[in-house]
Amino acid sequence: MFKRICYLLAGIGMISVTTQVAAQESLGRAGIFLRLGVGGRALAMGRAYTGIGLGPSATFWNPAGLSATQHFQAEFMNVNLPLDRRLNFFSAALPVNGLFTFGVSWIGLRVDNIEGRSFDTAEPDFTFGTSQNAFMFSLGKSISPVLAVGGNVKLIRNQLQDDSASGVGFDAAVKLRPSPGLSLGLVLQDIGTDYRWNEGFTEGVPLTLRLGAAYHVLDGVLLSAEVDRTNGTSPGVHFGMEVRPVDMLPLRVGFDDSRFAGGVGFGLPFSEHLLEFNYSYATDPLANDPVHRFSLVLSLGSGQATSRARPQDVPRIGTDRRGRPPAEVPVQPRRPVLYAVVKVNRLNVRSGPGKGFRRVGRVTKGARYRVLDEKGIWVRIDLGEGKYGWVHGHYVRLVKK
């Protein structure tokens, strides 16, 4: 599997041609703000995020990835760019009864202090600003454990001095998980997207194709690669890596075309929730100046404070998460006894169904554990001695007794 991933990354690398020129070409076309990228994690990994497509920013990178959302999540980013530009991003994702995940997001770009002249003069006669906004409504759904699909409907509203424009556009996305640790993403962005100005002029936003891959090489080490192409431009190539020496402190590095990127994250669990701070550093492709970005992600019901969670706090078999005795636990319907067989060399066991929960141990390849519960892609297993833990369902095989 690792060799196949190496071949894939090498193949993407061979596609790279004049990547700096490609970035400049894309920025000069309509709908620039729809291609700048969002989210501290994704930007720190060189924009190689289509194959990952997790979290609230999946509404932008790969809406099919929303299908993996287990709890309500929201993300916000505000950044000042060179040349008096300001970019805002907000996104929220909510799973609906395990059927699909609904997302809503806003991308806004504003440019101020644009100089206006009536004649060829050294001093401007006036200054003005322009704003571009897109409101996106997203759906992501798992079709099978291997395949997920998603899409966006976007409403666009632009303002330039006294002129305004509005329009609509669409995105379509697919995410594949052909084997444990490997995910592939394909996105068609801005299908038929255009906006019409009040003076009757219509601008078409060029179609963008993005293809990405991500692979967990080792526990806590994630590699990603991506190639994209906007109609009328040369392809761009992106690489990223994330290393987690500590679960709540990921380190990230990447290359956005030929430009270096990097960053760090910090997770702050509180109660059963998680607050994540993500920082990214990159070079602006238009002004060639450094840009520092910060984003904030809130996950409700997917975190646990490590300072307050101890091994003896893990609920025992016969009690629920609140530690209630069996008489108070609602009776569940009988179901076939299942066992989880570990498929990878080492697999983290967590205190809850999500990567934000504390790691309580590890299990090894071939080990067999009784399944106690399932929640989304997470499986709760019996660790023995009255303790249990949660493992990622992609890395175990469920078998009947």
Image: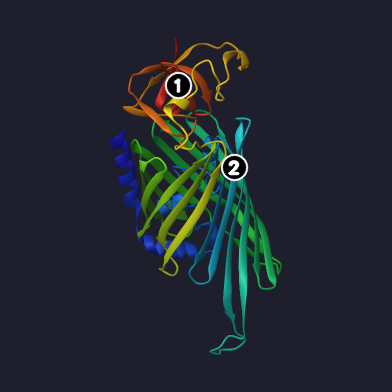
Q: Amino acid at mark 1?
A: Tyr
* Viewer-nearest residue: 277 or 28: 277
Using the numbered discs, state the Cα–Cα distance from disc 1 to disc 2 in whole angstroms: 29 Å
* Viewer-nearest residue: 361 or 157: 361
Q: Which residue is mark 1?
A: 388
Rendering colour mode: rainbow
* Viewer-nearest residue: 219 or 29: 219
- Specify whether residue 222 is in view: no
Q: Is residue 171 left or right of residue 245?
A: right
- For image coordinates 60% across by 52% down, the residue present is 192
Q: Percent from the top left, x then y, of residue 86?
A: 55, 65
Q: Percent from the top left, x then y, of residue 74?
A: 57, 46
Q: Percent from the top left, x then y, of residue 198?
A: 71, 67
The reply to whether the C-beta atoms of the residues labelled 1 and 2 are less than 8 Å apart is no
Q: Is residue 211 left or right of residue 97?
A: left
- Specify whether residue 370 is in view: yes
Q: Amino acid at mark 2?
A: Ala
Observer-side mark, 1 or 2, equals 1
- For image coordinates 33% across by 39% down, the residue present is 5
- For image coordinates 47% across by 60% down, the residue present is 232
Q: In terms of secondary structure, where does tag 1 sit?
A: strand
Crowd around label 1: few <14 · some 14–19 · many ≥20 (10 Å):
many
The numbered mark at residue 264 is none
Q: Which residue is mark 2?
A: 93
Q: In terms of secondary structure, where does tag 2 sit?
A: strand
